[in-house]
Image: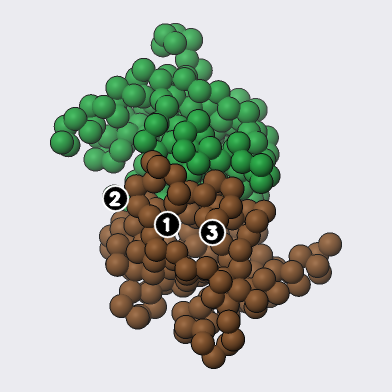
Chain colours: A brown, B green
Amino acid sequence: MTGWTLPQPMKRALELAEASAAAGEVPVGAVITRGGEVIAEAHNTPRDTCDPTAHAEILAIRRAAEALGQERLTDCELWVTLEPCAMCAGAIVHARLAKVYYGASDPKGGAVEHGARVFEQEQCLHKPEVYAGLGEARAAEMLREFFRERR
Amino acid sequence: MTGWTLPQPMKRALELAEASAAAGEVPVGAVITRGGEVIAEAHNTPRDTCDPTAHAEILAIRRAAEALGQERLTDCELWVTLEPCAMCAGAIVHARLAKVYYGASDPKGGAVEHGARVFEQEQCLHKPEVYAGLGEARAAEMLREFFRERR
């Protein structure tokens, strides 16, 4: 997908991923929208905040729920640069997010189209609509660069 | 398992689950120990704090990591009254918890011995030792009571 077709929230998520890398954190960014408006955004911060749960998605979900003063994000969309892991996919279910747009696939840690496939479990209480591949090339490139520099 | 054989951290987790129910939250309690010492504890608070990620395990993990000033809880044990869900199982992996003791099985939402079976995925980077059934009867009874009163 070329840059000019990329929806604004995914462009912003990519900017957040870039900020994450600059801060020494794995480059993943997330934005939550409702009715076209951004209500929360975040990038990974586990190292900086000593919090193993501080993935971009978890932080964005917590901030969106706080901003709306409600536990559920029923009519909201999540835009994230990387396929969510099991922890984040589980949080997406608990938050009842309507739609999830993600960039790069993650065969090693992803739990949407890989591994635990959280939304595909029979017991799964809420299955968001999922759209993969938006901004994939840039999201994957940032991750490769980040890990290459650290090896 | 009878009460007198129950390890102290699981007794405490059950007390926290009871406090959770009293506060109108799903009765789940969690304790994290290191070398026999309690370093963090929590019960569910999603309703009270408008945070869909505020499960007992997530809160206890965040508090333990903050208390130790490190992202990983490599030499720590988690004691929780209910089988962890996909979100919490994923967080346990990220935190590298050494051992997980849990009470009641959860066929509907659990992701250790049910559904997503997070620790059994080939891609899973860290598999904690898991011990199920400690304090199961009391943990399950509290959950049944809680949901019976709300139906």
Residue A83 at least partly seen: yes
User: Closer to the camera: disc 3 or disc 2?
Assistant: 3
Crowd tier of the residue under label 3, counting other residues whose Cα lies within 10 Å: few below 14, some 14–19, many 20 or above:
many
User: A46 and A31: which one is in front?
Assistant: A31
Q: Indicate whether A64 appears above or below B53.
A: below
**Relative side of A8 to A150, left or right:** left
Mark whose residue sits in front, 2 or 1: 1
What residue is disc 3 on? A84
Identity of the residue drawn at 69% across and 69% down: A143
Element type where label 2 sits in the image: helix
In this figure, which residue is indicated by the disc labeled 2? B48
Indicate whether A16 appears above or below A46: below
Sort mark 1 into few (<14), some (14-19) or many (20+) by Cα contacts within 10 Å: many
Q: Of helix, strand and loop, which one carries label 3?
A: loop
Q: Chain of mark 3?
A: A
Type of amino acid at the residue the image marks with label 3: Pro
In the picture, the quarter occupied by the C terminus of chain A is bottom right
Q: Nearer the viewer, residue B64 or A81?
A: A81
Query: x, y percentage for residue A72?
Result: 31, 58
Are labels 3 and 1 assigned to the same chain? yes
Distance from the alpha carbon under mark 3 to that under mark 1: 9 Å
Q: Secondary structure at mark 1?
A: helix
The amino acid marked with disc number 1 is Ile
The amino acid pointed to by label 2 is Asp
- Distance CA(mark 3)–CA(mark 2): 26 Å
Q: Check if mark 3's residue and mark 2's residue have beta carbons within 8 Å.
A: no
Q: Please give the residue where the numbered disc 1 appears in the rendered image.
A: A92
Pinpoint the chain carrying mark 1: A
- Would you say the residues marked 2 and 1 are in contact, meaning their CB atoms lie under 8 Å apart? no
Residue name at image x 39 percent, y 46 percent: A124
Q: Position of residue A127 (x, y in %)?
A: 38, 55
Let me know if marks 3 and 2 both belong to one chain.
no
